[in-house]
Every structure is written in structure tokens, then in C-alpha cells.
Image: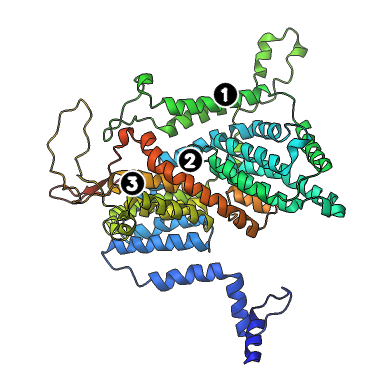
Amino acid sequence: MGGFVSGVASVFKRRDPRTPVKGALPRLKNIFTVHYRGVLGVLVPLLILTWQPKKGQHDITVACLWFWMAWFLLLQPVNIPVVGFIPLFLLPMTGVIPTVDLCKCYFDDNIALFILAGMVHLLLNSCGADRRIILWLLCSGDSCQFSGKRIIFKASAAAFFLSMISNRLIVTSTITQFLAPAYMNLQSSTSSYRTNEPDYDVMRHIVLCAVQTASSIGSVAVLHASFSTLAMRAIWCSLVGKPMSGSSMAYMRNMLLEQDKLLKPFLTDYQKCCIFFYFAYLAACMFRWSDWLNMGWSGFEKVVPEIPMIKDATVAALFVIVLHILPKSFLFTNYVTARVKSHIGDVLKPDSPVMWWRYVDKNTNYGYIILMGGAIALNLGIRVSKLNESIPNYGKHITDLGWNASLLVICIIAAILPNIMSSVAACAAFLPFVLHMAAPSTTLRQGDETPAPDAPAAPSAPAAPAPANPTPWSSNFYLGALIVGIGSSFGFAAPFLYTPAYFCHYTGKVPIKQMIKYAIGSLIICIIVLWPAICFYAPIIWVDQSVGIKSYSLAPPAGGDAPAPSPGTP
């Protein structure tokens, strides 16, 4: 018996990768060890889903599609954006939604806003203002301000606030590139007298985990403020260990000051211009909704008269076009101001615009547009196939809890999912369930759209009765969507691509086990902060007088079937 156990153990024990693989059992073990994502990712959907769909029952087809996408997003046997193509071929082939209607999901005003606002968000990064602010914060103070605790505070503050107004991935990458080499050099230079110095590898792990966590939290910008960052600093500071010596703090200061010397002493006119236009864009987005600033330059939607026809994507497009036209410098004015020919300078050389296309094109994640479109298509298929009518049977386990308790459950799930799959993937897989887990508060027949304020009332078929026992989720489901959107940014533990944790692991060389260890406390703190904010603060901000947002399910009109709803229908 002992020989059998030792033989089985020898099969699964770690070996030199150069060792030849002999025998059937070692080969199977090698396949499942190295290629388990591809094997399980493909075999499980084939075994579970191929016999499920039935002709004419589109709800079963869409449910299988939902599982298929979620499984691929979890195991990632293919690249994540590829999953967004699955609805594009499956829903038309099974007769759920025509191809022409489905393709509209892959580019709408939300996708346009994702692209255009992301380009405007790169303004401070493209002009180098983010590097200047980061180094100004890191290099502030004398040598005593470069201890482990102070570096955690300064680096986390830089990552937190700059992630609000610039690209969080570039911010995290920049801070990591400044701090990681400095701590690695300190570790090697103090190796001969380690008993008197702290372990700078551990300090590097703590500081960089703090940076990527603060960057993730700061990117949501509204509900958390800096409470989670400060609490995170209080917890992690206790793990630093021995205090840094004066010479080590001076060494750290000198290394960061060397980076600061590479920058010009003052903000350039180009950097000032980028900062001005970025905050002008934010002001335009906010004041566009103001009643007292309504100049009558656009109409209002017919279905929802309170919402202007010009949305955030249009404002972003306006700024992107203007910034691509406006030159970075006005050298051509030398033709007017120069007194002699030598004062004209290098005017004939083409001048780049304020927003440089190559930079924004390189740093725009077009792949996730496909994934977002696939998620919109999935949500549309859920409604068209009437799968949303059966989802409340499963969602009642959450909605039947107390209102605050159900919000807490959603917070916990939304915060855990981005640590086992990519943040956008977690949102795409979980948000359709949250949106449909409660019965809608009103059933609206086709043709019953809200008329314009001055239009005469038109006769219409009577609306179907509302649910007998509506839950708070029926009119406040937007709070669940808000939780999923914010909680999906809490991916602190796993280095998925296009997340701050990616740079923490691959650039900062922080092991995944250490990332998980330091992420647990931050995740708990974020849940504790997010939960009461959604319960008490969000209804005051998002909906006036906390009346909620009504959802509508489209019912067929008298004498015919309803056409497929548009992707933007709640």
C-alpha cells in the first residue's frame, strides 16, 4: 500500500521541466496541469450545454449563452474580448435576435463614451503632468519623510487622486517604475548588514500593493473618498517591521530626486493647456444637466422628457475633435510677430495637436469594446427571450432578505468576483442577474411611451397591473447596478490584464500570494464603506427624494407581437 501511495505521489510531484514525459498517466497529468484552462473551459460547456436548448424555447438558449460566457470569463480558455463575439453568432443562428438588431449593441452612446472619454482622460498623462505631480508628492520633505510609512501615504495619495483625473493604469505603472527599482537597490545595498535594516522586499510588496489598491479605489472617485485608503494605510503600516535607518531614507530620497531632476522646473504651457481642457470637459459634462444653464441648443427625448438629447458621449466627442485640431504650440503666430526672418523659427515643421492621436490610440483598450457589446447583447437577449421573467424565481433568495441585508450580499459578491476574473468580465457576468432578479415595477405596452410635456394625451391600451407584492428592488434596482459597477473595481488580489494589480505583479515583482494576503483587509474595508454608502447616501445623490427608478418590461400591444426592445431599454 505504501508503494502504491508513493507511486501516485511521484506522478503529481513537481519535476524538472526538462524531464521526459513517459506513460499515459503522466501525460494526462501534464495536460491538465498546463492546459487545464483550455481543457475544462471547452469540455464543460460542451458536456453541459449541448443537449439543453430546445426549438422555440429561446429562454433556455439565452440561459446557456449566459453560462457559456460566464464560464469562459472565469477560466479564460480564450482571450477575454473574444467572449464578446459569442452572442453575435449564437443569438441570430438560434433565431433569438436578428443580426442587424444585435450589431447595434456593439456600438451605442455608451461605447462611444467609453472610447472618447478615455481619450480625454489621457490628457494629463500625454503631457507629463501626472509624472510631475507624482514626483512632487514622492519627493516632498526631508529624509525623514522617506520612511516606509510616509512612502505608503505619499504613494497611495498620488495613486488615489490621480486615478480620478487620469488613466489609472498609467499612473500605477509610473509610480511602480519609480519605487520598485529604488527598493530593489536598497535591498541589495543593505544585504551585508540585514540585522539592522528591514527587509526591503517586504516593504516593496506592501507599498506597491497599497499603490494598486489606492489606484483601483480612486478610479471610482465618488463614494469612497479617501476613507478606505487611510484605513488601508493604518493596517499595512503595522507590517513594515524594523524602521529604516537614516542613511537608507536619504538613499531613497536621492533616488527619487534623480527622477525629479529630469523634469523641467515649472509646468509648461502645453501642460497647463491640457489641465485646463480636462477640467473644462468635466465642467461641461456636469453643467450640461443644469436647468439654469439650458440655452435651448438641444431638444429632449420623447420617451423620457427629462433627459436631453445631447449626452456625455457628444460632449466628449466635441472636446476630442477640438483638441485634435488645436495645435500644441502656436508657432505659426511668428509670421505675424517676427520682425526679421531669423525670428520666425521652425514654423514650417508640422506641429502636433494638443491631443496626440498615436498616444491615445495606443492607450485605448479597444478589445473591451467587444466584451461590453457582448454584455449588452446578452442583456438584450435576456429580455427578448423573456428569461427575465424566470430570473426573479432565483433572485428571491436575495430580494426576500431585508433591504439592507440584500444590499450587503450584492456588495460581497460584487467585491469577490473581480478577484477571480477580470473586472469588466465580472461586471458583464453578474450585472444582468442584478438587473433582473426582481420583478419590474411596471409593465409598459408598446406605444405607451411618455408623451412630450406639451403634447396632447393619446389613447393607448391599458397597462398591465404591477406586481401584487413589489419589493424595494423593483424601483431601486439601480442601487444594485451601482454596487456592481463600483465593486468590480475592487480587484486587488489577481493580476489580470488592464488592472493596476497587473503592474504590481509584473512590474513591481510582487508575488501573488503576497497580493492576496494584503488584499483581504482592503477588500473587507471597501465592502464596509460601500455598503452604508449605497444604503443611505446613494439614494440622496442619484434620485431626488429617494423615489427610485421604475423599470419597465415591454408587453405586446393589442392585436400583435411586440418588436424587440432597443438595447438601451431598462
- Residue drawn 73% across the image and 21% down it: 346
Q: Is residue 78 above or below residue 124?
A: below
| Relative to 130, 46 lies left or right | left
Q: Kindly identify which residue carries mark 1.
A: 276
Report whether residue 558 is seen.
yes
Q: Quadrant of residue 262?
A: top right
Q: Secondary structure at mark 2?
A: helix
Q: Residue at x 71, y 79 (%)?
A: 20
The residue nearer to you, when weighing 76 against 321, is 76
Q: Residue at x 19, y 49 (%)?
A: 556
Gap between marks 2 and 3 measured at Cα: 23 Å
Q: Residues within 10 Å of mark 2 (few under 14, many from 20)?
A: some
Q: Give the residue furthest to the bottom.
A: 1
Image position, residue 540 (x, y; %) = 37, 35
Label whose residue precedes the other's in the sequence (1 or 3): 1
Mark 3 falls on what kind of element? helix
First along the sequence among labels 1 and 2: 2
